[in-house]
Image (cartoon, coloured by chain):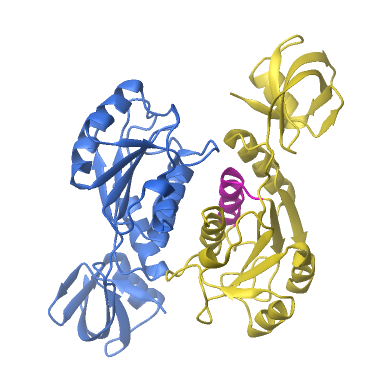
Chain colours: A blue, B yellow
Amino acid sequence: MIIFYSRTVLADQATLEGDEMTHCTRVLRKQTGDLILITDGHGKLYEATIGMITKNALHCHIKKTVRETLHPCSYAICTTPTKNPARLEWFVEKATEIGIREIVLFFAARSEKKNVNEQRLHNILISAMKQSGNLILPKLVICKNTADALEYCKTYKHRFMAYCGEEAPCLSDLTKVGEDTIVLIGPEGDFTSEEVETARKHAFQVVSLGDARLRTETAGIVALMMMHLAR
Amino acid sequence: MIIFYSRTVLADQATLEGDEMTHCTRVLRKQTGDLILITDGHGKLYEATIGMITKNALHCHIKKTVRETLHPCSYAICTTPTKNPARLEWFVEKATEIGIREIVLFFAARSEKKNVNEQRLHNILISAMKQSGNLILPKLVICKNTADALEYCKTYKHRFMAYCGEEAPCLSDLTKVGEDTIVLIGPEGDFTSEEVETARKHAFQVVSLGDARLRTETAGIVALMMMHLAR
């Protein structure tokens, strides 16, 4: 069951552009009149027929809503780009498959990586959303430093910080099921004590993700699973 | 805290060979008399001093046991090599970081991939074990087909099969904490109905890993986390 993503769904009209259009017309050779599935990335899956095909856009007529996600994921991860970009890309793909509300990226004091390929990450989000059948495109936010990230996270009711530097309760035991929660994951070199203190001032509670020393991207997936599986 | 892995620990003597020796002498420039940490991959972490360094081996004298894992992981995953080998390698690394007893690989009826680089996977197991501080090297077993894999899994008390073809209870609700359990994960094209029936005959119970359509390697990690976090 192939799902296409449309950025622009208006009333009973949806448009496919760029890679989505190419995939539909060039790869799958769909033509005017063919029936396809489209998601708006906001929780809705539509059945639509292909109408006019222009040079840069494929115009579709929505027939009906096939499925709707009524309970979007409440959990988010705020983490740092890994030195090896492939590791961050794995995290973004897996988190989207598992289900995540938002991925906030920031450059911490000890982050070796100082930039990210935002477009590439966005494409990974879209393909993982389509592949997994999750109908909600996670939001991707990039903050230039720790202070900005902490400020941005204020909108979350529950704020946790995975920090290896001290004894802390496990995230599994603190998660409030279904309530907006964000978990802060540090860089390969972990947070500086200053960053930990600033996070505390922003009401972040230090949590543990277990005994193993996890890589940044693994910690992100483990934290997300702990929230998803909390009882 | 760098940990070295020694295949051969006898009484108070441990030997580092191959990559472990190279990493210790060439990369970290350790010399005779230096103190290092060694794990036997069976749950023990030793403090040892470097003794004689020969062409092919680095001989160490164990001073004391620093740490010991008393409760090895009871959970295992039996899965199929992915078409893209990087996806399987990602699974092997992440599963080792999170903690897994055994990884059983097999070639299912619909597996597109017909071979694996066993040595490469073994090296990933070792480096992930060392990096995570888990002192137990997961066992890697390769079975040539589904029948052999199902036969091999008989030693596990609880056997589950993640199959998308039917309604099933969630693995989280069925896991018996700390009891030997293995979860069977199908290939990209899922199991054939014949394979599902054969698995049932081998006492595998069909389980769900949630609503999302997960890639093979993601399903493996989600299943492992569900077992680890079961209450």
Asked if residue B20 lies left or right of residue B96, the reply is right
Q: In the current view of this chain or complex, which residue is farthest to the bottom?
A: A33
Query: Toward the viewer: A19 or A200?
Result: A200
x 63%, y 69%: residue? B160
Q: Is residue A47 above or below residue A78?
A: below
Query: Toward the viewer: A86 or A26?
Result: A86
x 43%, y 42%: residue? A85
Query: Toward the viewer: A142 or A78?
Result: A78
Asked if residue A127 lies left or right of residue B175, the reply is left
Q: In terms of secondary structure, what is the magenta stretch mainly?
A: helix
User: Residue A73, how many percent across, how many down?
Assistant: 31, 61
x 68%, y 39%: residue? B126
Q: In the current view of this chain or complex, which residue is farthest to the right?
A: B10
Q: Is residue B91 magenta?
A: yes
Q: Is residue A55 visible?
A: no
Residue span colored magenta: B85-100
